[in-house]
Amino acid sequence: MINLQGQYREAERGRHMESLNNYVHEYTNQLSKGQIQKAYKGIMLFMSGLSTYLAGRHPDYTAGNLYFGYMDMTYFAFTPSALKEKKLKIAIVYLHEQGRFEAWLGGSNRKVQSDYIELLRSRNIGKYRLSQVTPGVDSIIESILVEQPDFDNPEDLRRQIEERTLAFVNDINSILIRGIGG
């Protein structure tokens, strides 16, 4: 069972407290306009189609299930076998609040994630951001794929994400070979 009230209190710690009723009222007002539902549905359909598209074009990769999230992030794993063998995965992530796509290198569990962050801490990872080992962080390395996606041109957006994800995977493989001896 999910303790949403506990999560709400945790998220509000240290900030000016407003009531959950006020948040729900604002949420209801925004939903009554209809734009949030249309945008959310469009993002989910795009992400689902992207996963299917990539899986069809890259059978040597494993595509995971789509995680819808809590309007914070939506993602799916898209991992080549070489990384999967190292207990690593690539996630293609849409960050709702930032309105952008990112690729994340992640571990199969928190220990793997922590171990790789430590191994790569003193390495040159080029233009990428190395994550910190902290609660709630699900990545080892992050990269922005598309800063301002154009959902009105889904074919172009799919191609941009595909090309940049494959480049990210190639860079990650190079970093791992250089950084920890393959």
Image (tube, helix red, strand yellow):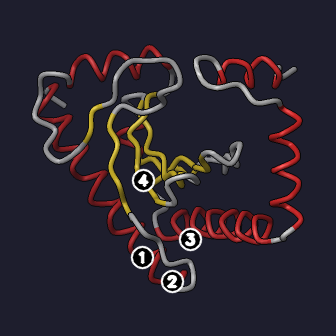
Residue 102, label in figure: 4
How packed is label 2: few (under 14 Cα within 10 Å), some, or many (20 or more)?
few
Of discs 1 and 4, which sits in the foreground? Answer: 4
In the image, residue 83 above or below residue 151:
above
Q: Earlier in the sequence, mark 2 or mark 3?
A: 3
For label 2, the residue is 155
Q: Is residue 143 left or right of residue 161?
A: left
Contact flag, marks 1 and 2 (Cβ < 8 Å): yes
Amino acid type at circle 1 is Arg
Q: Residue 16 location in percent, x, y?
A: 64, 26
Amino acid type at circle 2 is Glu
If the image is split into quadrants, where does the C terminus sit? Answer: top left
For label 1, the residue is 159
In the image, residue 41 above or below residue 9:
below
Residue 53, label in figure: 3
Secondary element under disc 2, as helix, strand or loop, is: helix
Q: Residue 80 location in percent, x, y?
A: 41, 48
Give the Cα separation between the discs numbered 1 and 2: 6 Å
Q: Earlier in the sequence, mark 4 or mark 2?
A: 4
Amino acid type at circle 4 is Glu
Of discs 4 and 3, which sits in the foreground? Answer: 4
Secondary element under disc 1, as helix, strand or loop, is: helix
Amino acid type at circle 3 is Tyr
Give the Cα separation between the discs numbered 4 and 2: 18 Å
